[in-house]
Amino acid sequence: MTRAAIKGTAYCLNYASELGCYYGNTPYTERVEHGESEFIQKLPPKIQSYEAAASYPPNLAYIGAMSVEELEASAQPWYTHLKDLSRFGKYGEIMPEDEFIGLMDLCDVFDLIWLEKTFAAEVREKLEKHPLLKKEQLDRLEAGHDLSEINAETEKDGALPLYYGGKVVGCCRKGHHSDENLAAHILLENLASKAGGVLVLLHLLKNTGMDALEVRYVIECSEEAVGDMNQRGGGNIAKAIAEIAGCKNASGCDVRGFCAAPVDAMTIAAGLVASGAQANVAVVSGGAIPKLFMNARDHVRKDLPALENCLGNFAAMITPPDGVTPEMRLDALGVHTVGAGASPQAVTTALVYEPLQKAGLTFTDIDKYAPELHIPEITLPAGAGNVPEANFKMIAALAVMKQQLEKQAMPEFIKKHGLPGFAHTQGHIPSGVPYLGHAVDAIKEGKMTRAMIIGKGSLFLGRLTNLADGLSFMVEAAAPAAKASEGGITKDEVKHVLLDVLAEFAEKLKA
Amino acid sequence: MQNQQRIKDAAEKFGAENTVVILGSSDAEGAELYAETVTVGDPTFAGPLGGVSLGLPVYHIFDEAIKTEADPTAWEEQVAMMEMVLDTDALAMAVAKMREEHSAAKL
């Protein structure tokens, strides 16, 4: 079997403006190096509110409250042309920050998150109304602590305060008296990723109509390192997520590949399912606190709203082909090898041209390409350009070089086969996979034949290699299921023929 | 920052008159910034070339002077695609402007 079905997807955002303000890496290092500088003071009033974020067209497209076509047609700039507020969409939700803090406490099994009593009670009431949280999960919420206890932890014991509405409502404690790898800010980052992963996995179960007990394996694909001083990146947030989500029959592991990890994780999951090694695999990831307000310096300087206020999560359920559900093809993966070269041309050739050649397809046989899908309103002011558009231009240019497209047809190709960016700059999250849910739906509805999901990673960031990296796969309608009786012969039919022949033979012997 | 140091070291080792900087920036604003850095000095004062004026000859790879020097096969394999994607004239000119005003030597 060289295919696996994508039974469903889920996409959530966790609004996290105060987490970002204090612990997003750009504001955090600014405070450490320059204290309450001009940037730190100018940031809070520029932050897009929850109400605006839950009305912001790209965010609505991300959670499936709006189609990609509707987003394309929406007036720009999107941040001044908000739609109606939608907390929930077809694929997931945009969770408010107080509930997310409660969710982190719910996901914490080492008493690292402390909540102030009143806040704990308020947030419990809100989470009890959440459509997907069950008693087994809500029972994990703590009753809370006095504010004085929380202040003692943050002032004397290396805990980090958690804020809501400008007030301290809790803290994240450290996990060890001296181990840097279990410092409060690392544990907070990991817990946020875990909590986001739990939420999106619960949405995935709802979207696929599956029970938590049906899940067999979870692969997590964030960029977090989970461990202590002796095993800094040991990992398996996957199993930690599965535990809280109630997936008692699942095991799991983590896959790391910088921003390309989600595409890696999906192809590994598909391989497990296509081979029969696992009956199903859920690919899951939460978001990254450090990347909140990553480009905010430029936004503030140019008097634009600071839009990087959400953690992004995603999940996909991989199941065996069933003749109906759209599928991932494993026979024509785009692979960027060690020897492939780092130029944009080499990368695009490896990830787009070569798999098309292998599958006997041309550039125009892909209805939509989904590379990195960063929201352009975030990246353009920061000098990083319109990333999706740059990718589509490169694909079109390569098509011209391979003589599959006329140069003057490039703009039309880009419009027809490209997409607007609608994912937050959360590293691994925008890397191709945000379009998966929309693609699967479009293929199911017969509106699209084929999409290509392209992930890329910046390996140099780890200082071990300068190599570029990436992976791609195609998504198509289900291959027709093989029908045993059509054109073939059943065992019973064979038996009947044999009996007839033997009876004939017996007659001849008698005669 | 490390690239600034590499350029500074190369200029010291080989001499500014024997060092040419070729930029591959994909946006004009960035190209201009890097061109300024290796001629006048890092305008942001963030790296080793802050306040250090090397006056090096600097070109964007799309500049005709560089393209004519390039091996056509290598060019076709590594750069030709991006010629169709980027505004080659704008990029070459952004760097040329800095070079005309501030480079001590030219190719």
Image (spheres, grey):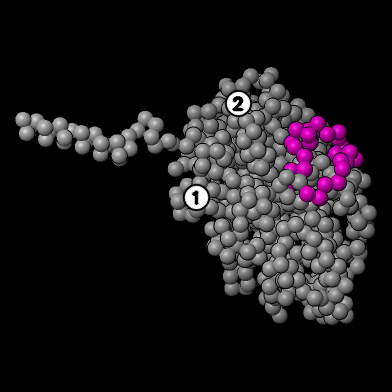
Q: Residue at x 46, y 54 (%)?
A: A277
Identify the secondary structure beneath mark 2.
helix
Q: Position of residue A434 (x, y in %)?
A: 68, 44
Where residue A503 sits, quadrant-wise, is top left
Residue placed at 58% from the left, 44% from the top?
Answer: A6
Say whether residue A80 is left or right of residue A214.
right
Amino acid type at image mark 2: Thr
Asked if marks 1 and 2 touch (Cβ < 8 Å), the reply is no
Q: Is residue A32 visible?
A: no
Q: Any mark on residue A273, and which? A: 1
- Look at the picture and state if A251 lies above or below A6: below
In the rendered image, residue A218, in percent from the top left (x then y), is placed at 58, 58
Mark 2: few/some/many CA within 10 Å (<14, 14-19, 20+): some
Viewer-closest of A312 and B75: A312
Q: Which residues are magenta?
A: A63-88
Q: Residue at x 81, y 38 (%)?
A: B29
Q: Is residue A79 magenta?
A: yes
In-front residue for pair A425/A477:
A477
Would you name the residue on which mark 2 appears? A364
Say the numbered circle drawn on residue B3. Answer: none
**Front-most of A48 and A244?**
A244
Position above or below: A283 against A81: below
**Residue A268 at x, y percent in the picture:** 52, 50
- Is residue A123 left or right of A447 when viewed as pictured? right
**The residue tagged with tag 1: helix, strand or loop?**
helix
Q: Residue at x 62, y 36 (%)?
A: A444
Q: Which of the two residues, A54 or A232, is positioned nearer the viewer here? A: A54
